[in-house]
């Protein structure tokens, strides 16, 4: 479309001025043109071993981090990788945060559907067995080698068949994938014999443990989503996944917190964030909706220039075990000065040394019990309230939620455990949660 500037006849000076402006603007645009490059989805031909004979599509944002995290994003049956790239928000989030996205293209048939991921064959259900999971691991290795991808930050997500493969990858390759976010999926092993019938949490968990016998490394975390009106994969599949993965992690099937992030959403957190479950009221078999992907990216810790610290919860850090609480900003531990057991003693940061005054027990009642059996206690509910030890009495000011994003949140106040500095002797307080490193903590076996 051409636009004509109407200038009075004889206004030569004006015409000349306009011409200069137009030429200047065009010159500026031409100068910028070589730099105005947009990342595109690229098919990768030879990415390594491919026993599943599936295709790989790769999205590397222009601002990819020097050591980018890796997200595998998988479509549902009858779907295509290129459409999943176009229709979901993972690529735009990659543009924002600098991680790399792999979009595998499935090719299997199941129940009259095409382009499904294999989650039923004996090869697909065991570590090193082959089929689609092994092909996807090859894609991850390709990104690690060719794009300097960070092998410590590899995650999976997907819809329907892609959600099933997400859980499949967590079970069969826990040494590769650190967490997964399935949208409208099923528990691992559900499509293999004997099917998706009722099992106890122990039986569901055994399916995962048997996928990689002898594995003793860190276990992947799970954030699972399901709509209550899903008429393809019944809503009951959400609870089956919860039963399975809480059992795998050895945490209670009772949530430690239940919240509503927005209207129609219910978020349940289990343990100290090893498992999260989102119920989407009225939603059918059509996830993720706009605005959901960012929650998965945050759960993975891909929403920043470096991995978001998450609680390093080892078996001894689950309820009943002794842990150190280490600050992400300071690297120092939550410490009771001079091993005092007096009620009202304010806690502090101090160099970690493993002493009894730096050991805490996370109880099933959400208490953090320290030296002398005293509880970590908030002396108020507002910003700046001091953190102290006090005789345990079961109050909400002595209950804490250790979340998947590394924060420790007071149940009574909803405020975060906050360090006012980073040096030895720094006092701790309650403060509004804002995501700073001074509000993030890791729990490590003492």
Image (spheres, rainbow, N blue to C red):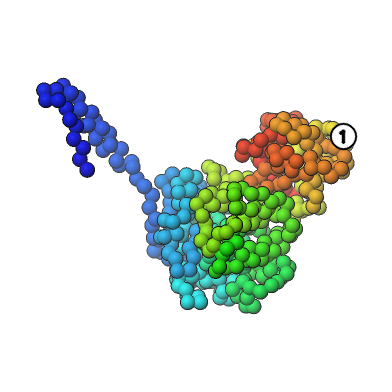
Q: Nearer the viewer, residue 101 or 87?
A: 87
- Give how far across and how far down residue 5 sits, in percent: 19, 32
Residue 145 is at least partly visible in this image: no
Q: Is residue 16 above or below residue 60?
A: above
Locate residue 393 relative to residue 40 in the image: left or right: right
- Quarter in which the N terminus is drawn: top left
State left or right for residue 185 relative to residue 91.
right
Give the image quarter of residue 431.
top right
- Of residues 284 and 194, the one drawn nearer to the viewer in this rendering: 284
Residue at 52% across, 67% down: 161
> Which residue corresponds to the image point at 73% horizontal and 69% vertical from the top-left?
200
Residue in the image at 41% along x and 60% along y: 82
Any part of residue 81 in sight? yes
Mark 1 is surrounded, within 10 Å at the Cα level, by few (under 14), some (14 to 19) or many (20 or more) other residues, namely some
Decide which of 234, 433 is in the foreground and name it: 234
Left or right: 22 as drawn, with respect to 330: left
Q: Give the residue at the far left of this rendering.
A: 10
In the image: residue 145, left or right of residue 325: left
In percent of width and height, residue 93 lies at 48, 48
Residue 106 pos. (x, y %): 46, 68
Residue beneath disc 1: 343
């Amino acid at each position: 479309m051409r636009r004509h500037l109407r200038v009075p006849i004889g206004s030569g000076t004006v015409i000349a001025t306009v011409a200069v402006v137009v030429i200047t603007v065009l010159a500026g645009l031409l100068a910028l043109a070589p730099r105005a490059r947009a990342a595109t989805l690229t098919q990768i031909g030879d990415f390594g071993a491919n026993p599943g004979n599936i295709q790989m599509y790769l999205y590397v944002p222009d601002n990819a981090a020097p050591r980018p995290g890796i997200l595998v994003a998988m479509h549902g049956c009858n779907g295509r990788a290129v459409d999943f790239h176009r229709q979901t928000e993972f690529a735009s989030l990659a543009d924002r945060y600098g991680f790399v996205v792999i979009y595998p293209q499935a090719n299997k048939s199941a129940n009259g559907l095409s382009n499904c991921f294999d989650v039923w064959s004996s090869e697909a259900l065991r570590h090193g067995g082959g089929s689609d999971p092994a092909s996807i691991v090859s894609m991850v290795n390709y990104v690690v080698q060719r794009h300097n991808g960070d092998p410590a930050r590899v995650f999976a997500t997907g819809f329907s068949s892609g959600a099933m493969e997400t859980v499949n990858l967590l079970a069969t390759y826990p040494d590769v994938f650190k967490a997964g976010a399935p949208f409208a999926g099923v528990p691992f092993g559900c499509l293999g014999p004997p099917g998706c019938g009722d099992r106890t949490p122990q039986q569901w968990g055994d399916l995962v443990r048997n996928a990689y016998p002898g594995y003793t490394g860190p276990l992947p975390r799970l954030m699972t989503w399901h709509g209550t009106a899903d008429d393809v994969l019944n809503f009951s599949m959400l609870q089956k996944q919860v039963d399975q993965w809480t059992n795998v992690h050895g945490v209670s099937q009772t949530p430690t917190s239940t919240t509503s992030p927005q209207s129609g959403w219910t978020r349940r957190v289990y343990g100290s964030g090893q498992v999260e479950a989102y119920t989407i009221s009225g939603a059918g078999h059509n996830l993720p909706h706009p605005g959901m992907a960012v929650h998965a990216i945050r759960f993975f810790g891909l929403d920043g220039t470096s991995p978001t610290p998450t609680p390093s919860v080892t078996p001894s850090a689950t309820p009943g075990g002794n842990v150190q609480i280490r600050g992400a900003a300071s690297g120092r531990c939550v410490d009771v000065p001079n091993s005092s057991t007096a009620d009202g003693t304010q806690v502090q940061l101090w160099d970690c040394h493993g002493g009894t005054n730096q050991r805490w027990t996370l109880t099933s009642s959400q208490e953090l019990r320290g030296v002398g059996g005293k509880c970590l206690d908030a002396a108020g509910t507002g910003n700046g309230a001091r953190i102290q030890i006090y005789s345990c009495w079961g109050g909400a000011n002595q209950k804490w939620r250790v979340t998947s994003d590394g924060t420790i949140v007071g149940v009574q106040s909803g405020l975060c455990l906050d360090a006012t500095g980073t040096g030895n002797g720094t006092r701790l307080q309650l403060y509004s949660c804002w995501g700073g490193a001074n509000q993030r903590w890791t729990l490590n076996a003492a």
